[in-house]
């Protein structure tokens, strides 16, 4: 099992804490005026989805989590579960909506995502950084009102609601950053 030093901490790093796999969500190196330096971290438990904050002393050793990533196709929503299929051997896996979280609204059906496995159990999903989806619900904007940074809510086909500029209309295809949930640009008109 590989080990990491606290200087190797970065966002997305998978480590073992108290026998459970965690992913680093945020980190900040702190060097107080008095005392030893440390790294303040916020980590998400990959099994339960809970988030903890922990200070790690400089030089502390961290055990890497034994995780595997597979590219899988999102097939459909089955109530409290989402079904994914491995495109190489057609094996299907179900993951609870709790583990997917808010990312579910940015998963288009038949889209390929990274599924994270820990000890043979699916524990998380990583979306592509950008998706293109049609707008299926929005208010019509006032003609000529494009000079300001005014936005309106728009629902995309995968289910998420995104703030978009007033010129985006029903049926337009937009590009969205799945990491932040922000509108990037319009890639197709209705």
Image (cartoon, grey):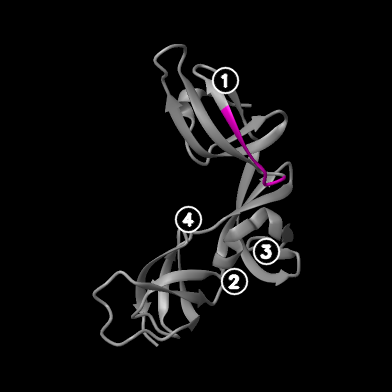
Q: Residue furthest top?
A: 35
Q: Which mark is residue 179?
A: 4
Residue at screen point 53% across, 32% down: 41
Q: Is residue 53 magenta-colored? A: yes
Choose mark 1 or mark 3, whichever is in front. Answer: 1
Q: Residues within 10 Å of mark 1 (few under 14, many from 20)?
A: some
- Left or right side of 81 for 161: left
| Spatial CA span between label 2 and label 1 | 40 Å
Q: Which residue is mark 2?
A: 110
Regarding mark 4 in the picture, which secondary structure is present there? loop
Q: CA distance from mark 4 to mark 1?
A: 29 Å
Mark 2 neighbour density, 10 Å: few (under 14) some (14–19) many (20 or more): few
Quickly name the residue at label 1: 61
- Tell me which label, 4 or 1, sits earlier in the chain: 1
* Image location of residue 108, percent across then percent down: 56, 71
Can you say whether 64 is above or below 182 in the image?
above
Say which label, 2 or 1, has the lower sequence index: 1
Q: Residues within 10 Å of mark 4 (few under 14, many from 20)?
A: few
Please state the extent of the stretch shown in magenta in the rendering. 48-54
């Amino acid at each position: 099992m590989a080990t990491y030093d606290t200087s190797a901490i970065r966002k997305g790093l998978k480590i073992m804490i108290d026998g459970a796999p965690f992913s680093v969500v945020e980190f900040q190196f702190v060097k107080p005026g008095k005392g030893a330096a440390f790294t303040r971290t916020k980590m998400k438990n990959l099994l339960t989805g809970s988030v903890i904050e922990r200070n790690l002393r400089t030089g502390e050793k961290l055990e890497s989590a034994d995780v595997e990533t597979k590219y899988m196709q999102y097939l459909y929503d089955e109530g409290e579960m989402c079904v994914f299929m491995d495109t190489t051997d057609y094996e299907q896996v179900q993951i609870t909506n709790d583990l997917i979280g808010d990312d579910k609204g940015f998963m288009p059906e038949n889209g390929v995502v990274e599924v994270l496995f820990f000890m043979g159990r699916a524990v998380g999903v990583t979306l592509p950084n950008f998706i293109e989806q049609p707008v299926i619900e929005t208010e019509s904007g006032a003609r000529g009102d494009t000079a300001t940074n005014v936005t309106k809510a728009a629902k995309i086909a995968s289910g998420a609601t995104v703030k978009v500029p007033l010129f985006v209309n029903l049926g337009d295809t937009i590009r969205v950053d799945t990491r932040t949930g922000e509108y990037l640009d319009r890639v197709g008109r209705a």
